[in-house]
Amino acid sequence: MMKRRGFIRRFIFVTSFLSALSVAIVSMTLFIWQQTDEGRLPAKTAVVLHAINNNLVSLDINIRPPKIVTGESGSPSLLREDITIPVQGGSQIPARIYRPSGDGPHPIVIYYHGGAFLEGFGDLDTHNNIIRSLASRTNSIVIAPSYRVAPEYVFPTATEDSYSTLLWAQDNAASLKGDPSKISVAGDSAGGNLATVVSMMSRDRNGPSIASQVLLYPLTTFQDIPLASREAYDSGYYLLSRSVMYKARDSYTPDEWMWNHSYTSPLQADNLEDLPPALIVTAEFDPLRDEGEQYATRLHEAGVPVKATRYRGVMHGFVSFYEVMQSGRDGLQEASVFLRQVNNETLRIRDEYALQVKEPPKGFDKVRDHTEAFAIAAYLLGKSGADFLIVE
């Protein structure tokens, strides 16, 4: 009996020691991942970036330890349809539609996915979660075109495809049970560029009236102008590198005159008046941060109602990771609330403009994010071994 008790005590001691050691290793590893030359990252940002940059997961961030990532609850049923849309030159482009059930008429959002205007950098599948979630959260019809990209198709093909989608949406609103008087445009990164450019094109061509524009960390200039965020965060660690930006410019706008065009570089456009109300979301650790915020200032100066929010502690593309990042959920929720207010005619934007800064999660959300980050770090370490301890 005494030997059995001694064995149990030793077993409990060894188990407790190994558990404590594991916790210490994971905690130390997570702390190391949080340290960067640009400052200390929030735990969730650090673990997501480490996973992606070390090719542990793809950009659709499919890291889902049990009980960590929860899907949306209470979502209304959505109908999905993959179609083609006619564009200039007699061509057709693929598009994806999510729309609520019911008679409507429902508001319409045209969503332009990001991807640096380049083949292989973004498509409807990589952005499907945002497209679907916007439809659910705003009770809107979301139409997402797969516009043609470089290097096969250069400017202005993407812009013309995007504008053709707007015209198609207006012409087919009734058959979709949509409201042609409530069409908004939205997009992220390169898609944010297209969303605001389509707004300009529709103004210039006396096209459909656009209710609002939602721009998530948009590219707003192809010109070489001094931007501190491009200098600080262009390594690629924050999911967008200077080399990709140059490749996008060389491929999508191969002639220098294209860099100066209003429909590629809206930040330098001569006329930004009479554009729809705008929400611009930027990320602290993003080379596109400053140009997005400068564009918000220029829109305000042109008399366009604009709201701009910088999310601290996150990187380019963070809204795409809303399923694992609280800040991503907050950004998606802000966009959804903005669109709902536009559609309900309750949007109020103060005359005076000021950039809003959204701090990283605090209180319970911070504890939850850190706990989930710890669990994901443990999951990744267990999955791939001690090589993760090496930080390049």
Image (spheres, rainbow, N blue to C red):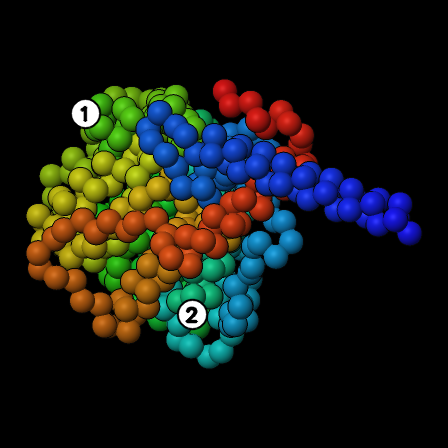
Q: Find numbered disc 2 in the image and state the secondary structure of the residue it sits on.
A: loop
* Location of residue 40 by image quarter: top left
Could you tell me which secondary element the residue under label 1 belongs to? loop
User: Which residue: 56% across, 59% down?
Assistant: 70
Tell which of 116 and 166 is nearer to you. Answer: 116
Q: Residue at the spot x=8%, y=48% of the render?
A: 301
Tell me which residue sits at (37%, 45%) in the image.
188
Which residue does the image show at 56% across and 55% down from the upper left?
A: 69
Question: x and y percent of residue 208 in the render?
Answer: 27, 59
Above or below, 63 relative to 206: above
Mark carried by residue 390: none
Q: Residues within 10 Å of mark 2 (few under 14, many from 20)?
A: many
Q: Position of residue 367 (x, y in %)?
A: 45, 53
User: Disc 2 marks which amino acid?
Assistant: Asn
Q: Position of residue 166 (x, y in %)?
A: 35, 55
Q: Is residue 176 visible from the viewing direction of this image? A: yes
Where is residue 7? Give x, y as percent: 84, 44
The reply to whether callout 1 and callout 2 are in contact (CB within 8 Å) is no
Which residue type carries mark 1? Pro
Q: Is residue 349 left or right of residue 107?
A: left
Left or right relative to 232: residue 61: right
Q: Nearer the viewer, mark 1 or mark 2?
A: 1
Q: Which residue is mark 1?
A: 226
Crowd tier of the residue under label 1, counting other residues whose Cα lies within 10 Å: few below 14, some 14–19, many 20 or above: few
Q: Residue tagged by mark 2?
A: 139
